[in-house]
Image (spheres, coloured by chain):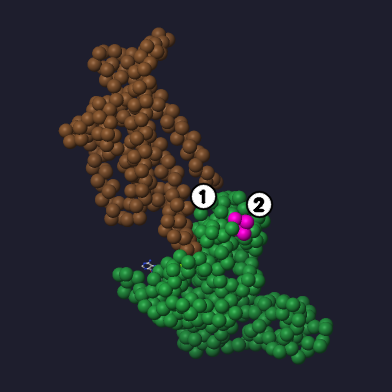
Amino acid sequence: MYEFFYGIFEYIGSHRETWLEAVRAHFFISVTILFASVVIGVPTGALCAKKPVLSSIVINFFNILKVIPSLALLLLALPVIGIGFWPACFALMVHSIPTILISSYTGMRQVEAAILESAVGMGLSPGEIFWKVELPLAAPFIMTGVRTCAVDVIATTTIASYIGAGGLGELVMFGISFMNLTAVVTGGLTIASLSLAVDAAFGLLQRRLCRIPVE
Amino acid sequence: MSDVVIALNKATKRFVGMKQNAVSEVTLDIDGGSFVTILGTSGSGKTTLLKLVNRIHELTAGEILFNGQNIHELKVEEYRKKIGYVIQQIGLFPHMTVAENIAVVPESLKWNKNTIEERVDYLLELVHLNPAYYRNRYPAQLSGGQQQRVGLARAMAAEPGIMLMDEPFGAIDSITRKILQDELLAIHKKLGKTILFVTHDIHEALKLGGKVIVMDDGKVQQYDTPYNILFRPANAFVSRLVAAENTLEKLQVLRVGAVASPARHSDNPNIPRVNEAETLSNVLAKFMETGAPYLGVTDDSGRVNGEVSWDALRSVASLRNEGMEYYV
Ligand SMILES: Nc1ncnc2c1ncn2[C@@H]1O[C@H](COP(=O)(O)OP(=O)(O)OP(=O)(O)O)[C@@H](O)[C@H]1O
Ligand SMILES: [Mg+2]
């Protein structure tokens, strides 16, 4: 057991530059995907919550896309969008946007009618109602969606390496091709640690932001 | 003070897809500073009428004037800020403290920070919540009655001239409700705001209202003083509505003013006195306690400006409900 972990540390030590570069690339792809998903998913979800017709179209559209596994999507998309960083981000966002969109939609929908009625009745503008009332009340739901999504994205970014976007997936792929178990495990464990760290970070952030006492 | 602040002229609302009007050709004037209650059974159009006034619903036909101006010509959000709105479900913002809730409209109006702070404290004291204790609490940490007090304070935050209240005490236990009713009357007396108050509780409507709008089927059945609603019902519907009220209940909602006559014995310093705003049940108690044949009626400064006699009080009990003939 000890030797096993020693092997991993040794591997990292001897391939420091490559490992760091892979972590950096992995993190960068994940952050880009997450950021873009929030920027697209939150407003779209919020808009869907206000427009029932739009919501059924948009949500069904993403549900259909979501049925296709990420890897299949990556490979299907390959001839159309090519290889590299942006194609990888694009293909993975098909899965990450719906998570955030639906959590933002749900968050907006659960705001009580009476709360909105008083907000309208007291003469707040739609903008004020969105920023001061709806968004803060939807925030716990959105945050949960973002947190789930972040962990997902870090895991799925692994397969981005298949279309040459780099990241820790390369380490795993390399290990598989050359029957190098240490490389596979090092890649896998690094991804797992990254997920756990991101999950914990979002957990803290969530506790900070959502200060509504329940009782 | 008694200028008309809200005038409805054949105000009509029909919701899309409905066969009937929810509110049908309502024409009436609300005087500035008056406390008007809207009474009616479920579905009679009380809420719709109230929401037409602050434009949550838009009229199908007719017009509503606010200080002589058609409300459709006013900027809707500016207009609504001049009107306080309180609903049964209260609708406090759960993510904001009590103080933040009250400050929403003043902040939206860009009031100065100190002015807002002072205003919040003033309003909390007005609704009998100690600012030191309650400012920084969240709505979930308050009882239903306390939440409704905050709702009332929030609605009054930007000094609206008019308050619209839709069954604000409907979900509150009867003891607390009575306390809140009395406090609301006191606030109305102190600030002189125009209040339009919806209720389906006849007792509440007669007790609070200087005038009562009785609604049925989207139409106004009678718009009159509690005394006239009780003793001069305009039609069979109103007559049936008030028939269930017995003498004691009538005494509980009617006020001294309804039976007082000009002072003839004001030179006598020994006569027991009652305030003109007292209910007749308190007058009855005073008669029973003192055995006096008449009581002096005083205004708030303590000056005697009328009197009420035992016979005048008894007339309430013996007054025939002139609407009885509708019932056969
Ligand atoms: N948004 C709406 N869309 C369609 N119909 C409505 C709407 N709101 C109210 N109505 C209808 O209008 C009529 C009057 O409703 P309203 O809510 O004004 O009654 P109410 O007197 O306030 O009753 P309650 O005492 O139960 O609150 C009812 O028949 C109701 O079904
Ligand atoms: Mg109603």
Q: Which residues are magenta?
A: B113-117
Q: Is residue A172 visible?
A: yes
Residue B311 image-quadrant placement: bottom right
- What's the chain of the residue with tag 1? B
What kind of element bears circle 2? helix
Instruction: Name the chain letter of the residue that bears numbered label 2.
Output: B
**SS label for mark 1:** loop
Q: Amino acid at mark 1?
A: His
Q: Crowding near pointer 2: few (<14 within 10 Å), some, many (20+)?
A: few
Residue under the point 31% across and 17% down: A184
Tell which of A11 and B177 is nearer to you. Answer: A11
**Which amino acid type corresponds to the residue marked 2 in the rendered image?**
Tyr
Is residue B194 left or right of B48 when viewed as pictured?
A: right
- Give the color of chain A as drawn: brown
Q: Residue furthest bottom?
A: B264
Q: Is residue B254 left or right of residue A18?
A: right
Question: In the rendered image, is residue B167 in sight?
Answer: no
Among the two numbered marks 2 and 1 on one chain, the one whose residue lies closer to the N terminus: 1
Q: Are marks 2 and 1 on the same chain?
A: yes
Magenta-colored stretch includes residue B101: no
